[in-house]
Amino acid sequence: MRVLASKPVKSILLLGESAANWLLNPNSDKQSDRVALSEQTTALLLPSLSSMIENPQQKAHAWKTLQYLLPVSSQP
């Protein structure tokens, strides 16, 4: 997390469980689509690319999670 302290980062996309396990604390709530890494940085948990290819229905879940990045005025 030292890198996050030196450069402002608003969001990090974590594609798949491996990415989430690599970055997040084992005690983090990985059941949620978003995990606060710091006051300024949020990790968005998305299915892996291979998972979305194998199961296209997961793309809808990924898109819903990505809506967080849109400005409030353009969210549905």
Image (cartoon, helix red, strand yellow):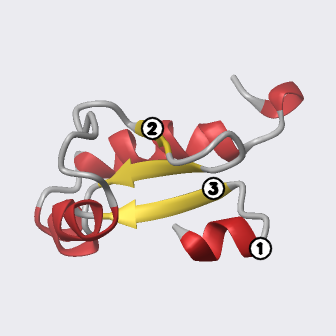
Q: Position of residue 45 (x, y in %)?
A: 37, 50
Mark 3 residue type? Ser
Q: Which residue is mark 1?
A: 7
Q: Residues within 10 Å of mark 2 (few under 14, many from 20)?
A: many
Q: Residues within 10 Å of mark 3 (few under 14, many from 20)?
A: some
9 on left or right of 59: right
- The residue shown at (18%, 69%) is 18
- The residue shown at (26%, 33%) is 29
Q: Nearer the viewer, mark 3 or mark 1?
A: 1
Total marks drawn?
A: 3
- Circle number at residue 34: 2
Q: Position of residue 24 (x, y in %)?
A: 32, 56
Q: Position of residue 34 (x, y in %)?
A: 45, 38
Question: Looking at the picture, does residue 68 appear above or below residue 56?
Answer: above
- The residue shown at (23%, 46%) is 57
8 on left or right of 29: right
The reply to whether dot 2 and dot 3 touch (C-beta < 8 Å) is no
12 on left or right of 14: right
